[in-house]
Image: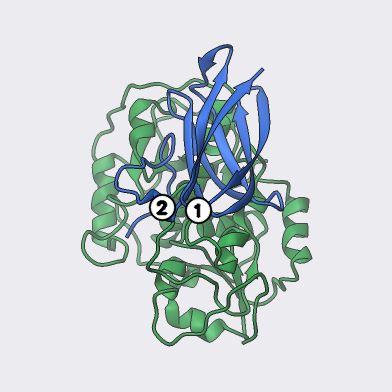
Amino acid sequence: MSGCGAVVGGVSLDNVDVKTQSVIQGVVSQNDAPASVGYVRLLDKNDEFVAEVPVSKQGEFRFFAAPGNWTVVTLIPGATNRTPVSAALGKIVDLEIVIS
Amino acid sequence: MTNNSLVDATWALAHLDDAKVVFIEVDEDIQAYAANHIKNAIALNWQSDLQDAVRRDFVNKEQFSALLSAKGVSNDDTVILYGGNNNWFAAYAFWYFKLYGHGDVRLLDGGRKKWELDGRELVSEVPTRAATKYVAKEQDLSIRSFRDDVLNAIGTKNLVDVRSPDEYAGRLLAPAHLPQEAARIGGHIPTAANIPWSKAANDDGSFKSIAELKALYEGAGVDLNKETIAYCRIGERSAHSWFVLHELLGVKNVSNYDGSWTEYGSLVGVPVAVGDEPGAA
């Protein structure tokens, strides 16, 4: 049985058939450096929580969503960011989230 | 918020070096603990430590006793559980410790996320604890439901599906931090109300106030005087909601269906509802 746990940075795309997935991924940075401590959550079109991952040491995150409109919310110590995004089947959306 | 089942960081900081208080980080992915953790915390793996290696079930009473004995946990220790994923697996472990009758077990409010976002210290040193002779009790099955309990609850008891609205409706088959599997059907158990676990938590992972939690369940039309069964996908998010109902709101007749959607959604011949509405019995 596979669990529900979120791995740091999100699940690797290795061995994942991207054609069947709607991937939203990206990198969080602050002061020109990756944010190594933080959490990224995915909200649906009604602003409901769907998933959350801790960022990797390189500030990376990844979600496997469904086609449609989503919001990516970034939480780092002392700051938050909201980024709207559209996902499509078979596509990888790459985000660069810069926290000022 | 603190009570007999929940502690905050202030309480935790005052007890980090207390020999009778055992901090335990519980995750599915133990890389986080390996990187760093709260001082003097030990680790439990949600899967390899707490699940039977062959069957889909928990380790038995003797195995749980052996596990905690080897980890250096005594029956009279105060166990403080925390973890990532907004304390999902820590709440699951809390319910599990209760299932096996541990006397004093509590959650750290907000878990690892709030601790990190608040900039509190994490260390890499792994503590050593002398082995004990832990003795678990028989499972308290009043807080655990099985598939037949759930089937019999349709139309007669409260069923609360705590997954995200998209999983409830069948639009997603798993949380969106995981690849979407293709082989399992989507949907929910007919009549189940959708009260996502996340509505009980603040952004930093801490629990909302008692007043907010009461309003959440009453606003969703759940009669808490009736027996309630919570479920999710594998039983850990619903353990979080079970904690809210049983430990924070004091609802006694609530149980967790740990088989959850991965079991129910694979059963042959059972009723399933799709879409945003609960569906009829």
Residue A9 position in % (x across, y down): 44, 34
Find residue B78 and report its image quarter. top left
**In this view of the protein, which residue sits in the foreground, A69 or A58?**
A69
Query: Label 1 neighbourhood size at 10 Å, few (<14), some (14-19), many (20+)?
Result: some
Question: Which SS class for mark 1?
Answer: loop
Q: Decide: marks 1, 2 in contact (CB < 8 A)? A: yes
Q: CA distance from mark 1 to mark 2?
A: 7 Å
What hue represents chain A? blue
Residue at image position (60%, 55%) is B197
Pointer 1 residue: A89
Provide residue A97's location: percent of width, then percent of height: 59, 26
- Chain letter, green: B
Circle 2: residue type: Lys
- Callout 2: residue from which chain? A
Dot 2 alpha-carbon crowd within 10 angstroms: few under 14, some 14 to 19, many 20 or more: few
Residue A63 appears in the rendering: yes
Q: Is residue B105 visible?
A: no
The reply, left or right, for residue B171 in relation to residue A11 is right
